Image (cartoon, rainbow, N blue to C red):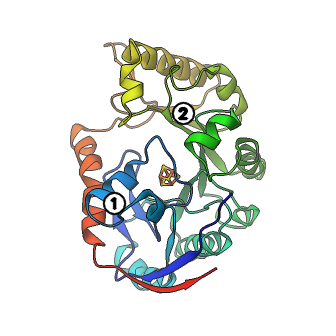
Amino acid sequence: MIKKPLLHIRRKSLLYKTGVEYGDYTINHVEGCSHGCMYPCYAMLMARRFGKVKSYEEWIQPKLVINAADLLRKEIPKYRDKIKFVHLCFTTDPFMYGYQEIADMSIRLIELLNEAGIKCTALTKGSLPPKLAEFSKENEYGITLISLNEAFREEYEPYSEPYNERIQGLHALHQKGFKTWVSIEPYPTPNIVTQDFGKILDAVSFVDKIIFGRLNYNAKASEYSDHKGYYTHLSRQVIEFCKKKKKEYHIKSGTMIVTQEETPCSSTKKTEKEVMAENLELQGIFKKHRGTRIKKVYD
Ligand code: SF4
C-alpha cells in the first residue's frame, strides 16, 4: 500500500443533521479518503465538483480535522436533546486502513459522545479497532463488503483493508455482543466482476442487518443488459435471506423494481423528501467547508 502522509486541518463546526437514508446526526472529521475507491466514490465526485479537491491524488491524501474533539465538546450540549445517534462517517472513512491517528481520533469522538449518553454508529472499509468493544453496548458497527475477490478489491478499493481482515474485525465486535451490519453497496454488475452473491451473504451471515444497493455513476453498470432485473433479483435474494435468518434489511432507493406486495425495508420506510435530501446533502457539505485551511503536514 502506498501510504500518503496525513495532513491536519482545522474547522469551525463538526456535528450536523443528515438527510441520508438511515441517518440522524453525522460527523465527517476527515477530508478526503485514502481508500481511493474507483467505482467511483460519490463523495470524491462532489468534492471535485465543488472545488474542494482538484484530483484523485489529492482526494486520497487524507486531512484530519485536528480540532474535532474540541469542537465536539462544545457542540454536544447544543444538540444533545435532538440527537438519536451519530454516524461516523458519510463523506470519508473513520477507520482508514493504515492511519492510526485517524482511528485514534474516531475513538476519542465516540468516547465523548457515549459519555454524553449518545449512541454512535460507524461504517468502514478499513479496520474496526478492538478498542471499540470498550464503549457503549448501544453502539453499532458496520463494514462495506461488495466482493470477496481480492483482485477486484485491489482494482476498485485499492487502499482499503483486505476483505477477510475486514470481516474478522466486524465478527470480533459481534462476538462481544454489539449490533453489527454490512453494507453491500455499491454492488457491481457481472460485466465488472463475476462472483457468487450467495457466498458474500454467507460470509457475513452473523450480522444483524444487511443493506444492499446498486452501483451508480458508472457507465459499465448501466451497460449491463437488464441491470434493473439483475439488481431486483439480488434484492429479492437479500430479502429472502434476511427473512429466513430473522435479520433486518434495507434495499437502497433505486436498486429494486418493487411490486405492490414487496417491502424494500424491514424497518422504517424512507420518504421521498428524505431521498431528495440525501442527494443534496453532499453538495451542501462541500460548499460549507470550502474555505478550510491546511494547518500542518507530517508523516
Ligand atoms: S471508503 Fe468511502 S469515502 Fe473512502 S474512497 Fe471509498 S467510497 Fe469514498
Say whether residue 32 is visible: no
Residue 153 location, x and y as percent?
63, 40
Q: Is residue 296 above or below residue 191?
A: below
**Residue indicated by mark 1:** 47
Within the image, what quadrant is residue 291 found in? bottom left
Q: In front here: 6 or 106? A: 6
Q: Relative to residue 261, is residue 179 drawn left or right?
A: right
| Quadrant in the picture for residue 156 | top right
Q: Amino acid at mark 2?
A: Glu
Point 23% across, 37% down: residue: 272
76, above or below 19, in the image: below
> Relative to 134, does residue 24 appear above or below in the rendering?
above
Which mark is nearer the camera, 1 or 2?
A: 1
Q: Which image quadrant: the N terminus? A: bottom right
Residue 246 image offset from top left, x and y in percent: 61, 27
Quadrant showing the C terminus:
bottom right
Residue 285 in percent (x, y) is at: 30, 64
- Say whether residue 245 is left or right of residue 90: right
Amino acid at circle 1: Ala
Are circles 1 and 2 on residues that touch, CB within 8 Å?
no
Q: Quadrant of residue 78?
A: bottom left
SS at circle 1? helix
Residue, disc 2:
248
